[in-house]
Amino acid sequence: MNLGEFVEPFLSYCSDMRGYSPQTVRSYSIALKALLNHHETEKRGGVTYINIMPLRLAMASLSKKTISARLSAIRSFVEYLNSYQEQKLKLQGDQSVKVPKSLPKPIEDKNIKEVIKRCTLEERVIITMLYALGLRISELASLKVLDISESWVRVFGKGAKVREVPLLTSVASLIFEYKKLQNPTTYLFEKDGNAITASQLRYRVQKAFKRQGIKATPHQLRHAFATELLKDGARISDVSELLGHGSMATTQVYTKLTSATKLQNYLKAHPLTRIIQ
């Protein structure tokens, strides 16, 4: 069986049917190219076994996170083939890799507010929406004017999932001011009728923070959004829904961060700490 002939149809399926981002599709393409170069096949009892131990050896120097992501892409590929092909396939040597979950590093609220004060109007809207709505930068780039009402924003997330995120009055006023000045036709952030790319928006965010001597990314603003909500008592299920996570397990990492913060604050504030020291 020639696996190579099914790669492009699978990538098109991921993009067109599953709604995966171009970055995810590129990652899948890299993983499958590596698979084609490093695998062995054997047919037994009507089942084709794909041995990916050669691939595991070739990936040995990569990070656990990268290996895990590539294995996940390969599993999805085989699942796709099993759904559309009469000949069944099974993977060998695809044992999961345990990836330690690193805690995100959100930007402090006071630093975000300080940067917002010194921004241009466009920068202020971009940063405020990322922080106030917890959006991914790709979601903000594709946000259309018609998706924004006075009190809600309709967000099209990963896997073509749609969610409604409440819009604060102050943020709605800021967006209104921006729309009045820029008069966007289709996308909130556009140039000549075309959406400004996620990369261009990311550059604007990084430049605004860099002027204040802070190294920051749009995703850190999303982290800050989640962390602040959980720290102030929001339910994890609600935060998970606002972030557009497919599972609350993905949101769990933020609870670990807020717990660590609470512990640090406790150790600093409790009177016995000063006595013992």
Image (cartoon, rainbow, N blue to C red):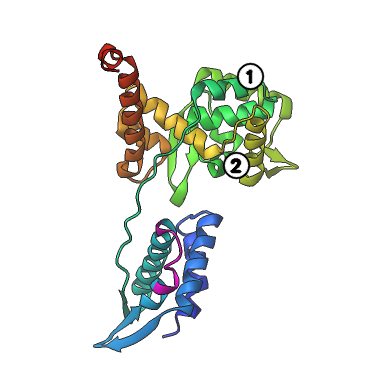
Q: Main secondary structure of the magenta part?
A: loop
Tell me the quarter of the picture where residue 111 sits. Answer: top right
Q: Nearer the viewer, residue 208 or 142?
A: 208
Q: Secondary structure at mark 2?
A: helix
| Position of residue 117 in the picture relative to residue 61 (left or right) | right
Residue 141's disc number? 2
Instruction: Name the residue at 63% across, 26% down.
Output: 124
Tell me the quarter of the picture where residue 145 sits. Answer: top right
The residue labelled by disc 1 is 117
Q: Secondary structure at mark 1?
A: helix
Residue 99 is covered by the magenta coloring: no
Q: Nearer the viewer, residue 97 or 268?
A: 268
Residue 232 visible: yes
Q: How far is disc 1 from disc 2 in space, using C-alphas?
A: 22 Å
In x, y percent, where is residue 34? 48, 73
Q: Nearer the viewer, residue 199 or 272?
A: 272
Residue 179 visible: no
Q: Amino acid at mark 1?
A: Lys
Residue 165's disc number? none
In x, y percent, where is residue 87? 33, 82
Tell me the quarter of the picture where residue 142 sits. Answer: top right
User: For the view shown, which residue lies furthest in the right direction?
Assistant: 192
Instruction: Name the residue at 64% across, 40% down.
Output: 201
Magenta highlight range: 57-64
As drawn, 203 above or below 85: above
Instruction: Name the residue at 61% across, 23% down.
Output: 116
| Position of residue 88 in the picture relative to residue 133 (left or right) | left
